[in-house]
Amino acid sequence: MGKLQDKVAIITGGAGGIGKGMATAFVKEGAKVVIVDLNEETGNEVVKGLQEFVPESTFIQADLTKHEALGDIVKQVADKYGQLDILVNNAHASKMASIEETTQKELDFSFNTGFYPTFYLMQAALPYLKESKGSIINFASGAGINGHANQGSYAAAKEAIRGISRVAANEFGPYGINVNIISPIAKSEGMIQWAEANPEYYERMLSGIPMRRPGEPEEDIGRVAVFLASEDSNYITGQTIMVDGGSIQLR
């Protein structure tokens, strides 16, 4: 019996990177995982791998910027499986620009792909999570916590996610629902491409990580997500968990 045996989880952005790592870690612990992603080809490929562990795992192709349809995704999953235990809001996209050069379009892009889907999916999932006394895992970033240059729209949306997660932790706690936040550094496909294009900057980044390596999406980030989604973390809520090798040490 795995730590997430027979639990039902939604993971947005599950077709690659951290999302794929978490989905893989979840199915290895017995969860029925529904990955939600825009990329249909990759999503179908990834879910085949998940089904080797848990055949009931599925993929839903969706554009998370279509906010009016987000409730339908949650209802579809709950109707199919008869329950919802875990919501992981991982998907987020943004474009780099200085504050001086950031436009409304760039702000809207970051909030529409990150903050608003997180908010509306939490809202839609709440009735089902009340029944299961489930868990929500949202995602922050060192870009917001440390204020990285040229990441204004991304940092703003990520810190908004942290803020609404703390509100949700206080509001949902009486129902037995815990809401936590992971702030990761992970060796995703995007980071690998970036490192190849910017080797000197990548080495400087590594030198700022006490453990001198980026996290592995499944073994490092995924295992922490398993913990936060399992009964082992029932008394932890409203927390930002830095899964970044020690690069940011909150006090």
Image (cartoon, rainbow, N blue to C red):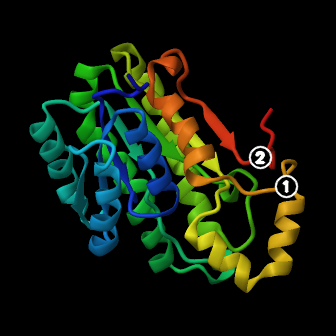
Visible residue check, residue 180: yes
Residue 5 is tagged as: none
Q: Residue furthest front?
A: 52
Q: Amino acid at mark 1?
A: Arg
Q: Nearer the viewer, residue 173 or 224?
A: 224
Residue visible at 23% across and 45% down in the picture = 55
Q: Residue furthest left?
A: 79
Residue visible at 51% across and 18% down in the picture = 232
Q: Residues within 10 Å of mark 1 (few under 14, many from 20)?
A: some
Residue 93 on image: x %, y %: 48, 69
Compared across the picture, whether 217 is left or right of 118 comes to: right
Quadrant of the image occupied by residue 96 = bottom right
The first of marks 1 and 2 along the sequence is 1
Residue 98 on image: x %, y %: 68, 78
Q: Nearer the viewer, residue 61 or 146?
A: 61
Secondary structure beneath dot 2 equals loop
Residue 83 on image: x %, y %: 19, 30
Q: Which residue is mark 1?
A: 212
Q: Residues within 10 Å of mark 2 (few under 14, many from 20)?
A: many
Q: Which residue is mark 2?
A: 245
| Quadrant holding the C terminus | top right
Residue visible at 13% across and 46% down in the picture = 76
